[in-house]
Image: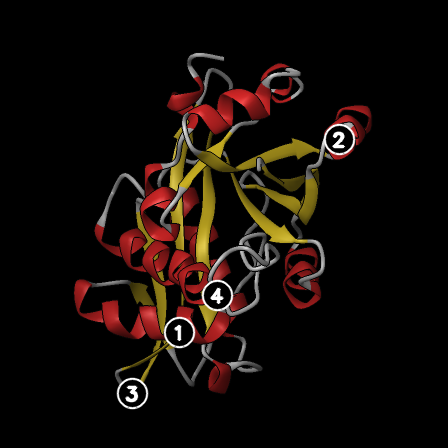
Amino acid sequence: MTLLKQYISDLDTKRFGFNIAKINDIDILLNPKLKIFANKIGIKLIISRQSVENIQAINKLEAIGFKTKDYQHTFSYNLKKEIPIFQSKSFNLREAEIKDGEAIKNIAQNSFYNYGHYFSNEMLDKSNCLEVYTDWAYRSLTDKSIADHMIVAEQNEKILGFLSFKIFHNNRESFAAGGIGAVSQEARGLGVFKGINIEGLRWAKNNGIDRMEHNVLVNNYPVNNSYIGLGFKVIRANTTLHLITS
């Protein structure tokens, strides 16, 4: 437990003004002295993501004070399959450019209020919760450690939506994971989300990637239905839990 400091999220700590740790190791989380050691180094909030298959572990976490804050599906698309065809006469799809940054931040700001596990925690300032998403969107455009690629939909030089991607490799495969994405309110219903995702599949396949995956909140029904309609399959589900330590 003396190594608890290594789990402190510098980004979240700076944003919210107190120490926040992200810990998924169940043995650490169920240590009877967890709160004592967390309080010694000023950790006020612990965030954990667990597979919903680990019901017993989740129940044990709930018993010591962890609260469920969201559930997520992970969708996967095998890029050996045929990719759907998409054509639009109302907008074009292209790689995002630095000049798109402010438009992307604005779409994120208007799309993610009250979304996700940060907003589900009443101790967290709402404006800082929203900054999680606006900052993530902008850094996905400007920082290759966050995202390798971003696609935007554009109509008459106006950005309608965006989606970022990060490439991962392991011993078995390479895959691209969707990061953050959103469609402007006025552009919803035009097929923007579908078009960006199909373009993302095409980009990944052209770069030799084996499959694509995306995480989606279970209660984000339109996006879940979109991925099912595109031929994605659910491969796992997780829950995010928060523990206020004092």
**Residue ID at (33%, 69%):** 104
Mark in front: 2 vs 1: 2
x, y percent for residue 46: 54, 35
Along the line of sight, the residue nearer the viewer: 244 or 219: 244
Name the residue rendered at 35%, 59% in the picture.
137
Residue 175 shows in this picture: yes
Instruction: Tell me the amino acid under the disc marked 2.
Output: Ile
Question: Residue flagged by tag 3: what amino acid is it?
Answer: Asn
Q: Which mark is residue 126?
A: 4
> What is the distance, in whole Å, between disc 2 and disc 1 at their CAs?
35 Å
Q: Is residue 34 above or below residue 119?
A: above
- Dot 3 surroundings within 10 Å: few (below 14), some, or many (20 or more)? few
Which one is earlier in the sequence, the residue at label 4 or at label 2? 2
Q: Which residue in the structure is indicated by mark 3?
A: 156
Gap between marks 1 and 4 measured at Cα: 17 Å
Residue beneath disc 1: 107
Disc 4: CA contacts within 10 A as few (<14), some (14-19) or many (>=20): some
Mark 3 or mark 1: whose residue is earlier in sequence: 1
Task: Please report contact status of discs 3 and 1: CB closer than 8 Å, yes or no.
Answer: no
Cα distance, mark 2 to mark 3?
A: 49 Å
Q: Earlier in the sequence, mark 1 or mark 4?
A: 1
- Between disc 3 and disc 4, the foreground one is 4
Identify residue for label 2: 58
Is 94 located above or below residue 189 in the figure? above
**Alpha carbons under labels 3 and 1: distance apart:** 16 Å
Q: Mark 1 against mark 4, which lies toward the viewer?
A: 4
> SS at mark 3?
loop
In the picture provided, is 174 more to the left or to the right than 222?
A: left
Going by the numbered disc 4, the residue's amino acid type is Lys
Image quadrant in which the C terminus is located:
top right
Residue ID at (58%, 56%): 116
Which type of secondary structure does the marked residue at label 2 adopt? helix
